[in-house]
Amino acid sequence: MKKTCLFLLGLVLAFGAQAQSKIGIKLSPTLSSNRINYEGNDAAFSSDGVGGRFVFGPIYDHFITDNYSFSTGILYAPKRVGLEIRRGNTPTTESYRLQYLQIPATLKLFTNELALDTRLFFQLGGLLEVKINEQTDVDVPVVDRFQFFDVSLHLGAGVEHRLGYNTILFGGFFYNRGLINAAAKVNGLDDKLRINNDLLGLDLGVKF
């Protein structure tokens, strides 16, 4: 896995050497939450709160025009799945720790300069997410296994400020909405449990 990550990072850096491209790195404090749906009648399921995480990794913007760019990268994205299970009057909770590599395929729209060397951007697209690890402290969990792949919708907005000739600082907000059921196999529920993973985060980074 380490060799694969280094190879993909090398590709990003190689593409970033092009004249109309920018490479960078971002660090994103996030809140990881879940949307839970259960179609059975023998129990009630709900989300057990949110968890704080950090998403980080290299990014790559290839400019199609001065105001449009294709944006991708390789991001490490840990997530938390928290379940509250109520059978009768006795609630129990379960927590799962998931780790993904995200590969964005998004379009960024940039405004003209609103102030000197400063402009806004809006970002829309999708994320292919590859699970690299999952853990839980429960001996017999409800979710026996999570999907190897996840797919999310990415919505974002922010501001960029140019420092000097090559360096650009940026910051903004984003929302990742999970589109598929992350639970691949559940125990004793006839696959009636649906879990969608969401992230809400703050983008901070630099491009050069």
Image (tube, grey):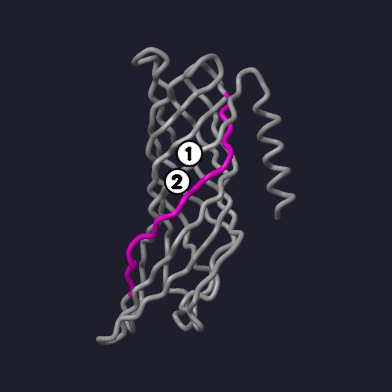
Q: Nearer the viewer, residue 56 or 48?
A: 56
Q: Earlier in the sequence, mark 1 or mark 2?
A: 1
Q: Amino acid at mark 1?
A: Gly
Magenta region's main secondary structure?
strand
Residue in view at x 61 percent, y 19 percent: 20
Task: Check the image and report above or below for 117 versus 47.
Answer: above
Residue in view at x 31 percent, y 77 percent: 44
Task: Check the image and report above or below for 46 versus 4.
Answer: below
Residue 166: x percent and y percent? 56, 18
Q: Are marks 1 and 2 in contact (CB under 8 Å)?
A: yes
- Label 1 and label 2: CA atoms lie apart by 6 Å
Task: Check the image and report above or below for 37 versus 175.
Answer: below
Residue 153 circle label: 2
Q: Residues within 10 Å of mark 2 (few under 14, many from 20)?
A: some
Q: Amino acid at mark 2?
A: Leu
Residue 185 circle label: none
Which residue in the structure is indicated by mark 1? 125
Q: Residues within 10 Å of mark 1 (few under 14, many from 20)?
A: some
Please state the extent of the stretch shown in magenta in the rendering: 45-62
**Element type where label 2 sits in the image:** strand
Residue in view at x 48 percent, y 34 percent: 205
